[in-house]
Image (cartoon, rainbow, N blue to C red):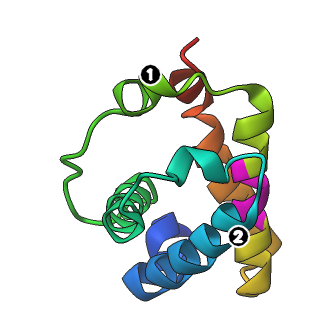
């Protein structure tokens, strides 16, 4: 039954997460508001971390062993504008992949649970 599936399953599993993260980082790297945060970052390694985190956050049957969001972003001095830019690219990516709006809303809800930690509040 659809209502018993995790968000991870509803959006299409790991293939969908992989496709979304690849498109997402293309958008992020083109955005002058935020691309400087990734200037000296190995983007392939970063993409792998993002894929693992999103799969876990969306309910994949796997453990997440990376840093927590507060520690991972503590040194970055991120603002509301930065968070909103990233969130916007995530939504745009999911729309580009024809993800249903109700699932995009679920993804946004998950993302919003990380906002205070990412912004260090």
Q: Quadrant of residue 60?
A: bottom left
The answer to whether 63 appears left or right of 19 in the picture is left
Asked which secondary structure carries label 2, the reply is helix
Residue 120, percent from left and from top: 54, 16
State which region is magenta: 86-91
Task: Please tell me which residue is depicted at 64% across the width and 64% down the height of the picture.
Answer: 29
Residue 74's disc is: 1
Q: Does residue 45 show up magenta in the picture? A: no
Residue 111, percent from left and from top: 61, 45
Task: Please tell me which residue is depicted at 53% across the width and 78% down the height of the picture.
Answer: 22
Tell me if residue 5 can be seen: no
Residue 28, percent from left and from top: 66, 62
Look at the magenta stretch and give its main secondary structure: helix
The answer to whether 48 appears left or right of 119 in the picture is left
Residue 108's disc is: none
Tell me if residue 117 can be seen: yes
Quadrant (top left, top right, bottom left, bottom right) of the C terminus = top right
Residue 93, percent from left and from top: 71, 74
Q: CA distance from mark 1 to mark 2?
A: 23 Å
Q: How many marks?
A: 2
Q: Is residue 102 above or below residue 11?
A: above
The answer to whether 97 appears left or right of 64 in the picture is right
Mark 1 or mark 2: whose residue is earlier in sequence:
2
Task: Please tell me which residue is depicted at 76% across the width and 28% down the height of the picture.
Answer: 80
Classed neighbour count for the residue bearing mark 2: other residues with Cα under 10 Å, few (<14), some (14–19), many (≥20): some
Residue sticking out furthest to the front: 40
| In-front residue for pair 66/28 | 28
The residue indicated by pointer 2 is: 27
Q: Quadrant of residue 14?
A: bottom left
| In-front residue for pair 63/67 | 67
Task: Please tell me which residue is depicted at 79% across the width and 77% down the height of the picture.
Answer: 95
């Amino acid at each position: 039954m659809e209502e018993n599936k995790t968000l991870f399953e509803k959006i299409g599993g790991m293939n969908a997460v992989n496709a979304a993260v690849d498109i997402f980082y293309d958008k992020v790297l083109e955005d002058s508001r935020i691309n400087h945060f990734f200037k000296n970052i190995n983007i392939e390694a970063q993409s792998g971390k993002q894929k693992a985190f999103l799969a876990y956050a969306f309910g994949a049957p796997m453990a997440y062993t990376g840093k927590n969001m507060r520690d991972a972003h503590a040194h970055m001095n991120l603002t509301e504008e930065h968070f909103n830019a990233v969130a916007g690219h995530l939504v745009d990516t999911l729309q580009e992949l024809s993800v249903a709006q109700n699932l995009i809303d679920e993804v946004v809800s998950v993302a919003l649970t990380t906002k205070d930690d990412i912004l260090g509040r």
